[in-house]
Image: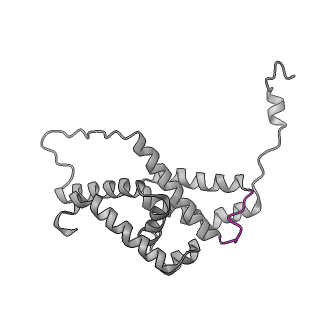
Amino acid sequence: MTEEHGRRTLLSVLEEPAIVIPDELEQAFRAHHGLVFRTAYRITGNAGDAEDVLQTVFLRMLRRGGKADPLDNAESYLRRAAINAALDVIRSRQANQTVPLPEEPSGLILATPAQADVSGLRQALTRAIAQLKPRPAEIFALRFLEGLSNQEIAQALGISQVLVAVIVHRTRQQLRKQLRPYLGDRS
């Protein structure tokens, strides 16, 4: 089997070296894949999207040579990378936003009004977070979806705790305005 006209033959493909995954990357994956998946799932609300985010985050690390970040704080880097990649997924989904109408057999109620309100609120919150600028979206996700304190966020991002508090406050106000139709008098 020879290569003709720039085409590769089966033998030439089989003789190519396999992709080598650095030990650091494999260790980071084994230690933190659950964290990345859970973080992405909290933001996307979808296991398939969370798996895509998981693959994206570790593929990006592979391209970087298997290193999480220069400070060797892999958990912080991976959590932030998962948040940003999940937000990217939500934003790309909004670009092709179509809403399928559920087919309901006559007389069958699929959800109670309270369940429908919660589902609508969750979708509206996901869309509202996706419309935020990257830094406020990341800080909001770290604070309210990941449960980190303002001090922990400040340390992870290398900014002051006061700045984190201001961004959290402003982001909550902005989201409250956008979600007013779902919150009613509670806002």
Q: Say which of 119 and 177 sits in front.
A: 177
Q: Is residue 49 left or right of residue 117?
A: right
Residue visible at 18% across and 56% down?
Answer: 112
Residue visible at 32% across and 58% down?
Answer: 122
- Percent from the top left, x then y, of residue 166? 42, 74
Q: Say which of 63 and 110 sits in front.
A: 63
- Quadrant (top left, top right, bottom left, bottom right) of the N terminus: top right
Q: Which range of residues does the magenta coloring cover?
A: 65-73
Q: Is residue 1 left or right of residue 21?
A: right
Residue 126 makes an appearance in the image = yes
Name which quarter of the figure residue 4 lies in.
Answer: top right
Residue 148 makes an appearance in the image = no
- Percent from the top left, x then y, of residue 138? 48, 64
Q: Is residue 39 magenta?
A: no
Q: Is residue 30 left or right of residue 152?
A: right
- Percent from the top left, x then y, of residue 158? 59, 74
Q: Say which of 18 and 120 sits in front.
A: 120
Residue visible at 54% across and 53% down?
Answer: 53
- Quadrant (top left, top right, bottom left, bottom right) of the C terminus: bottom left
Position of residue 128 relative to residue 102, above or below, is below
Position of residue 159 relative to residue 55, above or below, is below
Residue visible at 18% across and 63% down?
Answer: 184
- Percent from the top left, x then y, of residue 96? 41, 39
